[in-house]
Image: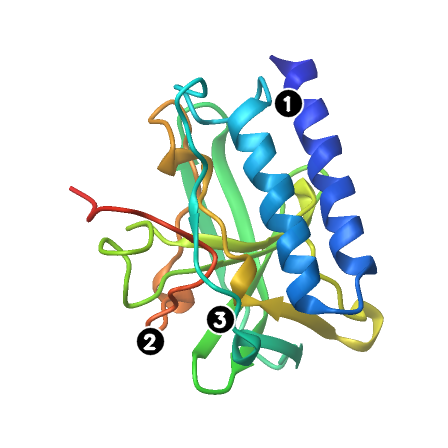
Amino acid sequence: MSLETADWRRHVFALYEEVRAQSDPAQAHKIWRTGRDELLKTHPASPVEERSTYQGPEIGAYRSDLRFEVTIDTDVDPVRWEVPSATDGVIPFSRVGVARLPGVGDLDVWWLESYGGGLFVPVKDALAGKRTYGGGRYLIDTVKGADLGGDLTAGTLTLDLNFTYNPSCAYSPRWTCPLAPKTNTVPVDLPVGELTSRPES
């Protein structure tokens, strides 16, 4: 399973590299959608358990108004967030800034303090438990390759909410996932990215 997981991550890194190379965000979204769909349906490390009958996730139509190039506000109090997991012990995060998205809300930007590090931006919207996964979705997770771009040396980050995707635990109870904290919860509907077809129980 370790080699399969490593191969999954290799594919994810390559997919997002192709996404960042596109000048047209809508075309980049199509590439991401096709690539992630294929991984979920066929890759041996996919969190989907019944891959032989899985048709792929429902994806919302691309909306250009939900793409943001933001300067991260780093003038924030340090906050530590610890997530217990069944397999990796406590997963520690530190808040490194806040992304302020006009018309959407604020999202904390987290740094994974475990080996390797990485930026992490989850998001939970007003449709959670109805049309989006109840625990929230992921937008940026650089340690696993989910990186939409930006100039980090200048403090900017690309946050395109059309690329929000379900954590592995949305597909299988075998996985433990950090779920969006309150500071990554926004009061608006985000019917984009990976959706769910039924309310969460």
State whether residue 172 is above or below residue 119: above
State whether residue 142 is above or below residue 62: above
Q: How many marks?
A: 3
Amino acid type, residue under disc 3 in the picture: Leu
Q: Earlier in the sequence, mark 3 or mark 2?
A: 3
Comparing marks 3 and 2, which lies closer to the viewer?
Answer: 2
Task: Please say if the residues under marks 3 and 2 sit with CB atoms less than 8 Å apart.
Answer: no
State whether residue 58 is above or below residue 109: above
Q: Earlier in the sequence, mark 1 or mark 3?
A: 1
In this image, 128 relative to 195: left or right?
A: left
* Distance Cα–Cα, label 3 vs label 2: 13 Å
Which residue does the numbered mark 3 point to in the structure image?
107
User: Residue drawn at (79%, 50%), measured in percent from left and top?
Assistant: 18
Quadrant of the image containing the N terminus = top right
Q: Nearer the viewer, residue 52 or 200?
A: 52
Which residue does the numbered mark 1 point to in the structure image?
5
Amino acid type, residue under disc 1 in the picture: Thr
Give the secondary structure at mark 2.
loop
User: Residue drawn at (38%, 32%), measured in percent from left and top?
Assistant: 171
Which residue does the numbered mark 2 point to in the structure image?
188
Give the secondary structure at mark 3.
strand
Task: Please say if the residues under marks 2 and 1 sit with CB atoms less than 8 Å apart.
Answer: no
* Distance Cα–Cα, label 1 vs label 3: 29 Å
Percent position of residue 160, x then y: 59, 67
* Distance Cα–Cα, label 2 vs label 1: 34 Å
In this image, 161 relative to 141: left or right?
A: left
